[in-house]
Structures are given as structure tokens and as C-alpha cells.
Image: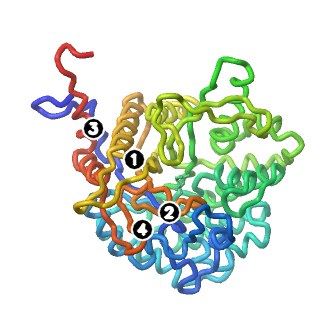
Amino acid sequence: MTSASGPSAAQLFPAGFVWGAATSAYQIEGSPLADGAGPSTWHRFTHTPGRVLTGETGDVTCDHYRRWRDDISLMRELNLGAYRLSVSWSRVLPEGTGRINAKGLDFYARLVDGLREAGIAPMVTLFHWDLPAALDDRGGWLNRDIAGWFAEYAQVLFRALGDRVAWWATLNEPWVVSDGGYLHGTLAPGHRSPFEAPIASHNLLRAHAAAVQAYRAIGGGEIGLVVNLEPKFPASQGSDDITATACSGAYMNRQFLDPVLLGSYPAELPEMFGEAWPSFPASDLEAIRQRVDFVGVNYYSRGVMRHDSSVPPECAVRVQQPGAVYTDMNWEVYPRGLSETLIWIKERYGDVPLFITENGAAFADPPVAEGGVCDPLRVAYLRDHLRSARDALHAGVNLRGYFVWSLLDNLEWNHGTSKRFGIVHVDFSTQRRTPKDSARFYTEVIRTNGAVLADDEVRPEGGP
Ligand code: BGC
């Protein structure tokens, strides 16, 4: 409740809380082959008929590669304190290793400098799904050598930008890379193999650790891993549903965090994968357990799971919740799950510093009218999730910042531009950017350091 003297301390976010927005290279940049860049797996994937539902590619998308200066001005208008971007590996190293493409590296140096001049702190993700195609030709995430390739690429960036970037994220959502890219084939490189997925996951973990190790020798800032998490609930109290829920949690939520933070895989995984579960040298797990400075959490929804043996390895499917609100991705809006997830991390893994590195929603927005876009569902989504983040802070979680997904409507991977997550609307035929009501709301959240979230908690006297 806001009193005449302003919101109480309990309602505010801590001083220095980081307020940002996030994007990724392939989703917004366009010009994927400009200035000597090599193709990525995503370039190949989108140029393969049938892979993207709308038939779109990342050739233009938000044209950020050419419009980055304007986009920084936009970020300044929105009052962002931080911006999470990703680097396209094949712009910097067109063959994935070896020769450095100075023009590609320069693009990111100018972007980082421009952000800093605008007072916006960059958080840089090294890998947000666009692997150099040249490395995919050598086996991609299935080749054990990729840990060394990734560390080499990471070192190039640490040396070039390490003095200007305080926060590095190694990988974005390795679970999605493995599950979508190697098990179900819906994302690049489009493989469908239960034998490949755990190998890809394991090499993603090894690569993450190799980059962290490289950073310790060079960098003076912070480095962490970004994972997507969702609390899992059984659809019923039947033992099948409860087991399926545990398996689903092991697969999605613990497959990466357990090895990094505890040094072992969840016990469920070898059983779930059966003979597809590979054997690894024991020393791998010791190497993977490198200290991280933070964990980035991408949170969108929860999973209410029902047993279904026809979909191994999880043997679990999602159940729709009657009466719940669903986004355009068909994801249930479940704000409480954000604080539940953050508190779960603290309870399971200890007091690791956390960022919410992505949170947001796709809704079918109305057209731009009178210079704005009315997106009340997204405003409500953000408000309720931010309140949930604040609840986690008050429960003692070491939460350092929040990045909304996404700054701009963009290429939503295999959905093309049909799903709009931006707080800023993008007209893809003119490239005009129009802040939505959600952007105005978020700017106000930032300006008041969250105090505005308390506003409509005022209850009439005698109310519940
Ligand atoms: C990814 C983003 C994606 C978003 C919405 C996350 O899985 O990191 O690239 O656009 O969720 O699907």
C-alpha cells in the first residue's frame, strides 16, 4: 500500500537493483552474412523449407545490425539500466575457430561502447543458439572438441571487451539447445535423437566450464550460466503423475544446474534415457563444477504434468488448466512460479546470486493506434511477475536484477515473427519501433525502482 509518505521499504526493490531488457543476435540483428560473417546453424535452418512455420528467415528481422544506434536511443528513452545482448559466434570467427573477423568483432565493440556511453550496462551472452555452421559440419555440440572451440571464442571476446563488460553469460538455455535441437528437431540443427541429446547437453556443460575457466585467467567481472526453469506440478496425486513430474523436473530444471552447482547429474536421467545415456569420463564432472558468479533464470510459465509413456524420456505431457490465462505461445500465466523457482534455487543450491535474465509474454497485440499499442495483458503479466520477484527478494533470495524479454518484437525462432514478445512493437515492413503500453509501464517501474508495483495493492477499508 502506498501511504502519504510513499511506499514502505518492504515494497521497494533494493538500491542498485538492475533493470534491463534482453534480446539475442539472430533474433534481431539481420544481415547475417554481412562484413565477412560466416553462416550459422540458424541461418541454415531458416533457409531450409519447412523449418520455420511462417517461412521467414533472420535475414532482416529487426535490422538491428544497421539500426543499433537508434535502438540504443530507444533504450535510453525507456530508461533501461542494462541490456542483455548476445554475440553471433560466426560474425567474430566465421569458421568457428581460428581466423578472427575484425569487422564482426568491431560491431560488438561499437555496440558495447554505445551502450556504456548511454549509461546502459551490457550483459553479454556468448552463445544464444546460433552456432557457426562450420562447426556444425564438424559435429557441432556432439563433438567433444567443442569445449575447446568455445573457450577459444570466449577468450577472443574476453580480450576484446573484458574491460567494458561486467557480466558475461556463457550459454543461453542449454536445455532448449539440446531438447529442441537434438531430441525433437524443432530448432537448429534439427536432429531427432535420444542418443544425441545427452551428449549435446554434456558438451554444452563442458563448454560452459571451459569458458568460465578461461575467464578466471583473464577477466575481472562476473560470469554465469543462463537456464530456463519452470516449477513442475503433478496433474494428479497418482504415482505415475508424481514420477513423471519428478522426471520432467530432473530433465528440464536440474540437468544443467546439478552438474554445475553440485557436481553430479540427477539420478533420474540415466534411468530415463536408458541405453541412450552415454558414459563420460568421471573427470568431466569435476571440470564442469566451476564456481559461477551468478545464475541467470529465464522464467515464463509452469508445467502441470501428466504421465504419458509415449513421449520418452520425460514420459510427461503438459495439462491445460481450466480458467487460467494462456499466452500466444500457449504457456500458462503463472506469476507465483517465478518466486517459487527463485526460492527453490536458494533451497537446493544455496545462496547463489541470481538475475532474472528473461521474463515476458507473447500476446496478439492490436495494431499501432495513435502512436501507441495497447497491450494490457502484457502489462498485467509484467506487473504480476515483478511482484513475484519482489516476494522472492523479501524471502531472502539474492536477486540482483531483472531483464524483460524482449526489448523488441523479433524473430521467435521456428515461429517466425508471428509471436510478439516485445515491449516495443516493430513494424517489420517499415522497421518503425513503437513503444507499447508495457514499455511505458516498465519505464515507470524503473523510474520508481519498483514502487509503482505497490500502487493498486491498496485495499478498501474492511476489504479482504
Ligand atoms: C529464449 C528466447 C526466446 C524466448 C521466448 C527463451 O527460450 O531464450 O530466445 O525468444 O524464450 O520463447
User: What is the distance, in whole Å, between disc 4 and disc 1 at their CAs?
Assistant: 19 Å
The residue lying at 57 percent from left, 47 percent from top is 227
Of callouts 4 and 1, the N-terminal one: 4
In-front residue for pair 78/434? 434
Q: Is residue 258 above or below residue 214?
A: above
Q: Which residue is mark 1?
A: 401
Mark identifier at residue 164: 4
Q: Is residue 419 visible?
A: yes
Q: Determine whether the residue tagged by mark 1 lies in a helix, strand or loop.
A: strand
Q: Is 119 left, or right, of 332 in this rendering? A: left
Q: CA distance from mark 1 to mark 2?
A: 28 Å
Position of residue 174 measured from the top left corner of the image (x, y, whole percent):
64, 52
Report helix, strand or loop for mark 4.
Answer: loop
Q: How many marks?
A: 4
Real-space Cα distance between discs 1 and 3? 16 Å
Tell me which numbered mark, 1 or 2, is placed earlier along the sequence: 1
